[in-house]
Image: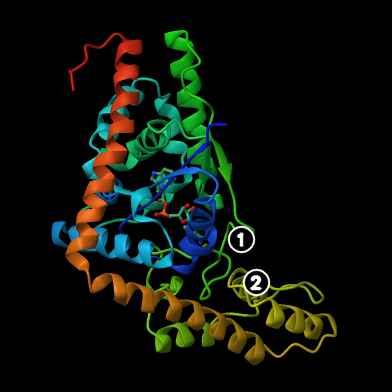
Amino acid sequence: MEKKTVLSCIQPTGHMHFGNYFGAVKNWVDLQEKYDCFYGVVNYHAMTMPYKPDKLRQNTWDLIFNLLATGIQPENLFIQSLVPEHSELSWIFNCFTPYGRLNQMTQFKDKSSKSTDDGFISAGLLNYPVLQAADILIYRADFVPVGKDQDQHLELTRTIASRFNNQVGKEYFVMPKGLHTETPKIASTADPTRKMSKSAGEKHYINVFDDEARIRKQIRSAVTDTGEPSGEMSAGVENLFLLIKAGGNEQAHVSLMEDYNADNLKYVDLKEAAAETLVALSQKFREKRAELLANKKEVKGQIKASSAEIRKRAQQTLKDVKDLSGLMNVRF
Ligand code: TYM
């Protein structure tokens, strides 16, 4: 039987944080055994907010090395701008997208409300979910492993796919399904009512590759009490438990949960266990990354080659789409 296809992507807007890792990337690694997987570092997406070109280049390669260090196989990894068909398909999909849906997207509302110096909001930010639909559908993905915050974008992707299918009179695209980990929403430790995120500011994320001291500091200052009624687990405490569980520290999780149930939990112990869990994971990945960085040139070459290979699949879909849409095709 032919393997099902998995696609997912991450933006190179900073380093990979534990929300990205536990919400998505950990799943990416595990899915590689069973599926045909495509994982993209989406640099076109990272242009939708004001940015610096040198930083974008640097972040793109940093993220590639970080993903490889966590266990993504190089042949499954590509850089979006090395597969320019994504942006061409995105234009075509713009013509199948109900535009009123775009300014209802939570991510658009969040990011457009963060005023920059001159109040500039790019049309790219509005059209971002259309490019995301192209990322997914260009590989005709069956499954998309993402965190909970991406559900809305996935829903729009299905709308675009079915509108396209209807208009061209063929069930060309399959409807992609989201896949969640057990922890699809990791909260900020500084404010557990919001998600861990790079765009919320320094305090609101912990990078997987941060040095030990920063990880410990961030966990030590985690907010635990947020005024919940007694008897209810606070969002901050729940989040720390999630981090321990997601990090595979089952033993600490069980024993601290027993303390909690006996009304005997000491926050300092909970924080210590969370910090230990994250530091151990980070240490393991950092060692792997150092090995990869020792062969920097070779690894970069590998990723350029895998992007070129993956591109062939994208080219085939784009060719079909252009045929189906009544557009002339370039021969390749
Ligand atoms: P991005 O780059 O913000 O995040 C990458 C992945 O990490 C997940 N994630 C989280 N999961 C749990 N808790 C959190 N606090 C948390 N923060 C982030 C995200 O859900 C995502 O799975 N629009 C996407 C990038 C994208 C994409 C795609 C994803 C572009 N094209 C095609 C899937 C398929 C984004 O901004 O993710």
- Dot label at residue 245: 2
49 to the left or right of 32: left
Q: Quadrant of the C terminus?
A: top left
Amino acid type, residue under disc 1 in the picture:
Thr
Q: Residue furthest right?
A: 262
Q: Which residue lies furthest to the left in this view?
A: 54
Q: Quadrant of the N terminus?
A: top right
Q: Which of 257 and 109 is in front in this view?
A: 257
Evaluate whether residue 256 shows in this view: yes
Q: Which of 292 and 183 is in front in this view?
A: 292
Q: Is mark 1 on a helix, strand or loop?
A: loop
91 to the left or right of 257: left
Residue at point 62%, 73% (across, down): 248
Q: Could you tell me residue 292's position as x and y percent? A: 29, 70
For residue 228, above or below residue 152 = below
Q: Are marks 1 and 2 in contact (CB under 8 Å)?
A: yes
Q: Could you tell me residue 206's position as x and y percent? A: 44, 74
For residue 36, above or below residue 239 = above
For residue 156, above or below residue 297 = above
Whether label 1 lies within 8 Å of ligand 1 gets the answer yes
Quadrant for residue 93, please give it. top left
Residue at point 79%, 86% (across, down): 259
Q: Could you tell me residue 138's position as x and y percent? A: 37, 31
Amino acid type, residue under disc 2 in the picture:
Lys
Disc 1 from disc 2: Cα separation = 9 Å
Q: Residue under label 1, please give it.
A: 183
Between discs 1 and 2, the one toward the N terminus:
1
